[in-house]
Image: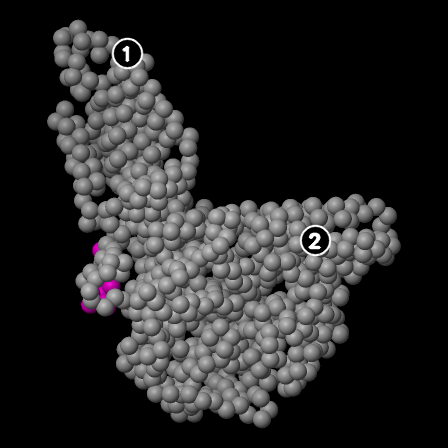
Amino acid sequence: MFKYILKRLFISLLTILVLVTIVFILVRLMPGDPFSSDKLTPEIRLNLERYYGFDKPLIIQYITYIKNLLIGDFGYSMKYVNQSVNSIIADSFPYSFDLGMRGLSISISLGIVLGLIAALNRGKSLDYVSIIIAIIGTSVPDFIIGGLLQYFFGIKWGMFPVAQYKGLEYTVLPSIALGFYTLAMVSRLMRASMLEVVQQDYIKTAKSKGISKFRITYKHQIRNAIMPVVTVLGPTVASVLTGTFVIESIFAIPGMGKYYVQSVQNLDYTLILGMTVFYGAFLVIANMIVDILYGMIDPRIRIAGR
Amino acid sequence: MVKFKKIISLFLIFVMLFTMTSCSTPGEKSEPAASNEPSNEVNNEQSNVSTSEQTEKKVLRYSLTADAPTLDPQLMNSIPSSTVGYHIYEGLMRNHIGEILPGMAEKYEISDDGKTYTFHLRDALWSDGVAIKAQDYEYAIKRLVDPATASDYSFLVTALIKNAGDINSGKMPVDELGVKALDEKTLTIELNNPTGYFLSMLSMSQLCPVRQDVVEKYGKDYAADAEKNVYSGPFIVKDWKHEDRIILEKNPNYWNKDEIKLDEVHILTVSDPMTALAMYEEGELDFVHVPAEVLKNYEDQIIYYNDGANDFIKLNMDGTSELENRNLRLALNYALNREDYVLLSSQGLYQPNTRYVLPQVNGVEKNYSEEYPYEAFPVNGDTEKAKEYLAEAMKELGVTDPLKIELELLTTDQERTRIEAEVLQSQLQTALGITINIRQVPYKQRLEMESKHEFEMVVTGWVPDYPDPMSYLELWPTGSPYNHGSYSSEAYDGFISEALSNTDPKERMDALFNAEKTLLEDGGIIPLQLRRNAMLLNPKVKGFETYFVGINFDYIFADIVE
């Protein structure tokens, strides 16, 4: 197990390095540059290029960036000029993480339960209710769900604050809006995979052995059916926890998602790179955890050395 | 089996933790170390609304769609930054919505040739109790011009202050700058030309003082957070949570503190305008912008103001397209119905514009458009005249079919700019029968293409940096770095150099007006619209002013009256 994790860690680092290199090249290929502004004169452009080291060859700039990256220094943002990318991430990530955790815990727990209920009541009205929720969740975009929640619960009925993120009551609406899609996805997956598991021979065996219905569901069905859900959780967790632009905009939450989108619009090279590396690392780690979880849930997939 | 149970129970604990605990919201932790009050924001605002017995704080609350990218005065390059900067830094003079009030300078003298200004500073303190000195101003302006600072707003003074241009391009050492502190209370500034509007620029944050010891102490992190800075203006930054809120507090050391009525200003970042509007309706904000789509719902309460943005089409006259032809340019100008254009593209929020210089800038005594009224092209267009010019142009260009005249209209990739471009395209094609192709690119790319002269027609704009026609007209002299359309006119250049050297205000203003007329009679640009904002303001707020140069809001003398 340890050897396996070590190997995965090494591959992960390599993946991140490749990611950095590709993004480093791609941002430079985007048309326009971070300095462009209405009032920029050629002389001032030269000063800016010198200041940021853009007058040096690209390969030198790349080596400098990687060197700094190795000591954990993402550099300074080119738009928020006095703020280091590290401090921007340190400021904004806790918001996204907190919101994401709330959204995920609601959506994963409810999603699994909903999927289970649907599968166990296949073809009955409870099943249809769950299907309808799932369809709404997957097909209605988050800005509409967020906007509706904000309008009804915030403005019309005044049950929750309209926006901002300053305490428990502020987290309710954005967490629901954020979690809705994942909830729908999880419940659909859970339902489908439960229905498949129910058909399996070992369930029949269990039944014929006279094991109680509850035990069959709990011990044999859920455990096997949950695998596809765990598979999608890696990337989902990574993307939800690192912030979502739309929900953060609607509810005025100072999370990472907004910086991510804006850094691309501003061609803020250092911020784009820093955010991408951070997100990449997060994704890689999340996927690694999923792989380890696999082995725990299903001994058949226990990986490598023992 | 045991492991599986463990996972499930771990997961459940995890769920409980994050749904139940309330105190882990990041917004609540880390109240500023600088403030003594333990209460958090939520309580502050509640106590504000409730009628508690203790004297209530006067708090102004508003939101911006984007946070101030920086509060480092010399590195500021955006209106959100400089609007905050205006309220936390004290310039030598204070431009209060066009009225020039004394700032840190108690009095000043101007030399007979109008080029040397001597300022006498009052006794005043920084927010940390250190005396404000003339050297702080000298250091600040040198810092702005120094190429090592790489300030993109150094352009404000490169043509203005003696030697600033040469220093900024690295041809001269910084010490040669025409800004000298003669002693702790006296500062002289030497200009290249007599410049009447110079005093009005002095409250721009870029020209406001910074303390060398503080800047050097924090290095690149200077002004990055509330406590990494010292303040000279009416307010200090009490707390700054990036992309969330800036909390300003009255500066107890401010020289004019008796005139400052507000105790606090809360500037929130709310990027979605509809959310901001909802917060205003909930009473959480005192001031909000109304998006064009919902203007009708608020018709009776709206206050309109111009923010100085003036949109026009730049035309490339460097000989790579038919636009080198003056008659064609005039045909385009006459073909547009600008009144219809603003109705279709902004629901009438923006105002049609038929000249180049922003009407609100200063004339000699009144504002420029009052002293020099002018309509270069009829606001509803003149199709007949447009066709005459087109016929003339076609003759000169040797074209027989107007469809053969094909022009590309460059604009950014936003929804609003797409609609604008489509209205322009339809008007020009219908009136003239020529072909207009729209090209949409990201904002930064448009700027780059513009500066590299890689366009035929581009929808662009300009906001003034000082309230004088020159702020617009300095774009078009031959060889100006902003002359992206390669416009070149001897007459125009002549009027501009006359305006630069003439010390008689009336003659100078006449020359500027002549320059504007020359540019428009040449069809050098296509004026389009003046941007206007619609706002709602809490009636309890008095003295909240809007302005169109450098900053959008001026609330230093604002008050909350019950």
Give the side of residue B547 with respect to residue A217, left or right.
right
Magenta segment boundaries in residue numbering: B29-37
Q: Which residue is mark 1?
A: A199
Say which quarter of the image contains residue B322.
Answer: bottom right
Quarter of the image that includes the C terminus of chain B: bottom left
Q: Position of residue B55 (x, y in %)?
A: 23, 68
User: Badge 1 sits on which subunit?
Assistant: A
Q: Amino acid at mark 2?
A: Asn
Residue in the image at 76% along x and 59% along y? B330
Q: Position of residue A148 (x, y in %)?
A: 38, 38
Q: Position of residue B8 (x, y in %)?
A: 17, 30
Dominant secondary structure of the residues highlighted in magenta in the image: loop
Residue in the image at 18% along x and 15% along y? A216
Above or below: residue B263 compared with residue B23: below
Please tell me whether mark 2 or mark 1 is closer to you in this view.
Answer: 2
Q: Which residue is mark 2?
A: B337
User: Badge 2 sits on which subunit?
Assistant: B
Residue in the image at 39% along x and 58% along y? B63
Q: Is residue A109 visible?
A: yes
